[in-house]
Amino acid sequence: MPRRALYILCCMAVSSALMAQPKPPRPGFNLFSKDQDVQLGREAATEVEKQYTVVKDSQLNAYITRIGKKLAAQPEAGDYPYTFKVVSDDTINAFALPGGPTFINTGLIAAADNESQLAGVMAHEISHVALRHGTNQASKANLIQLPAMLAGNLAGKSLAGQLAQLGIGFGANSVLLKYSRNAERDADLLGTRILNGAGYNPVEMARFFEKLNAETGSTRTMQFFSSHPNPGNRVKAVEDLIQYLPPRKYSQGSASELARMKQIVAKLPKPPVKK
Ligand SMILES: [Zn+2]
């Protein structure tokens, strides 16, 4: 093949690879304003904190907050007032409410093999917040009454309370925090970008989810997949996307620090049995 033709072919290959660069997932249809996401999340968090035992250990909180802040500082996380709290619950789970309050079960800390896996689940949760999946689902669930209610929402009035009257609950076990497979895939893809930016290997997020999925039938992991259905091929989807992201030197975090956190978790009083 003549040199020039080869050169043109190469250019075409490079430019088509650039053109094929996938766009980040974006929030879908939503009747709520971003401020209403924040208000609703704060109100729902107050309820969650009554239902769960929030762990007060200062070392554990500092550890989770350090990881969370690094992730929340990535542009893809959006400008939400994220908070990170540990709850005493030995199922392997985490959840985030609209607008940013994020809760991490002690069971998740106990199960993570490294800091990247823990950060991976947190980045996935942050992505649900940034993509506004909770209020997106609420918007689709009640197209008729919501617009008037949201427009008439007065300062000082509980948004969560008004939504409850419409049959829309936003607590920890709310149907609105049970996501679709599409939402899961998007949270993985946005989470991949957040992790890459923060210097964590995004493949660890996908590996951890696949590890949980392999433990089928375990009551410790069932809760996670009942609210976050497995979209399948997670490792491959993450690996495909990483090729397009700026290359990073990944850090796995300190193994001894995570070990210390696991010791703290192991010594906590047994979580109360949920009714
Ligand atoms: Zn999810």
Image: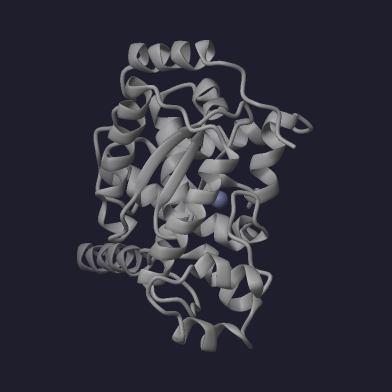
Residue 203: image x %, image y %? 45, 38
Query: Foreground: 129 or 231?
Result: 129
Quarter of the figure that contains the N terminus:
bottom left
Q: Is residue 195 above or below residue 179?
A: above
Residue 274 relative to residue 80: left or right: right
Residue at the (60%, 56%) spot, across then down: 177
Point out the image quarter for the C terminus.
Answer: top right
Q: Quadrant of residue 244?
A: bottom left
How has the structure been colored for display? one colour
Please indicate, yes or no, whether residue 235 appears anywhere in the rendered image.
Answer: no
Question: Observer-nearest residue: 234 or 166?
Answer: 166
Residue at image location 60% in from the left, 47% down from the top: 233
How many marks the image carries: the answer is 0
Position of residue 69 measured from the top left corner of the image (x, y, whole percent): 28, 41
In the image, residue 273 sits, relative to residue 174, either above or below, namely above
Relative vertical location of residue 260 with respect to residue 228 in this rendering, above or below: above
- 212 on left or right of 32: right
Along the line of sight, the residue nearer the viewer: 67 or 170: 170
Residue 2, by quadrant, is bottom left
Residue 76 location, x and y as percent? Answer: 31, 58
- Left or right of 198? Residue 191 is right
Whole-percent x and y of residue 198?
27, 41
| Residue 274 is at least partly visible in this image | yes
Q: Residue furthest right?
A: 217
Q: Residue at x 62, y 58 (%)?
A: 179
Residue shown at 41% from the left, 45% from the top = 123
